[in-house]
Image (spheres, rainbow, N blue to C red):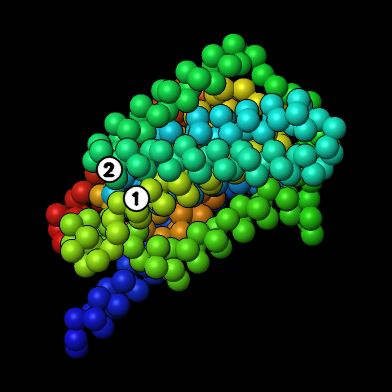
Amino acid sequence: MNSALKNRLFYRFHHLRDNFYMLVFLLASIMVFAVFAPEALSPGVLNSMAFQLPELGLLTLAMLIPVLSGGLNLAITYTANICALVAAALITTLFAQWGIGGSLLACLIAVACGALIGALIGTMIAWVEAHPILVTLGAMILLRGIGEWVMRGGDISGMPPLFASIGHGSWLGLPIPLWIFAAAVLLWFYLMHYTRLGFAVYMVGSNSKAAEYSGIPVKRVLIWIYMLSGAMAALAGLMMLARFNSVRMGHGESYLLITMLACFLSGANPFGGFGKVFPLVIALAALQLIASGLNIIGANQHLVTAIWGIFLITVMVIRGMAGRRH
């Protein structure tokens, strides 16, 4: 058996294994809440989850690509907030009389702002060779400071009806945000498995030096990685704007830990080079179910945050032990 076939079989095995583990985790979560909190599986709660999952899911997709490259993007939530702020400000001032066309143009500008923020972060990481954690942490603090200075503790509300129809509407019996999230998942799947950029992302995450020697423009790839991450974070910000009908700094702040947890729980290697999109979706569904179940049984929000931290530490310990065995 040649090495290429061995690598392909290894790849397929780990892909199926991660899908299987995530399905088991999801089914176990369902069984636990079916016994101890059956109301967590009621149609009303599941419908509410279907509206909440997409914004968390989009942020997690924004986190996934940097993780696959061996990095991290700690600025996704504040990128989302800043881009939503840009869209809301344009819609309520310059584009107030432009109707639906003005709203769509404002959304495109907001996504472009997210891509620009990500490109600047990627440029710092690629050309200055600063560590992604330090660069994105600095970007997070900078964006938060700018947003709070602009907002001064307030918010912008009163979005056009288009946003309410997107944030709370349904199509073919499913929430519109869920359709948008499904489209983003398919886009990410295609990008990572059927394009040169996706191949380059995995190569850079596996070994950036080897990727560079093989002719991959590592610096350019890193800029693209964080630019796409920023654009997806901006889309998540627009989703939160549509659901809350307002924007303020701090929306989705608690999602950052969950996005990292979902990435690592789904099998993504924290050092880069390995991770899949579909196991990530299953992990998100399980985590959203757990969060909703804990809220229904009246768990304190601080306790829920502590549980996410315990989950993340446990996952990393298990992954570390499994890595040593192999």
Who's the residue at 42% across and 28% down the image?
140
- The answer to whether one can see residue 34 in this image is yes
Residue 242 in the image: state x and y as whole percent.
Answer: 71, 37
On screen, 294 above or below 280? Answer: above
Q: Which labelled disc corresponds to residue 222? A: 1
Labels 1, 2: front one: 2
Residue at image point 43% right, 43% down:
119
Which residue is depicted at the point 77% across and 33% down? 95
The image quadrant that residue 273 belongs to is bottom left
Q: Position of residue 154 (x, y in %)?
A: 65, 14
Q: Is residue 178 left or right of residue 283?
A: right
Of 122 and 177, the residue lying toward us: 122
Q: Does residue 38 appear in this view?
A: no
State the residue in front, 242 or 201.
Answer: 201
Q: Quadrant of the image for the C terminus? A: bottom left
Local SS, label 2: helix
| Image quarter in which the N terminus is found | bottom left
> What amino acid type is highlighted by mark number 2?
Trp
Tag of residue 127: 2
Q: Residue at x 44, y 68 (%)?
A: 195
Q: Would residue 251 be found to the left or right of residue 100 on screen? A: left
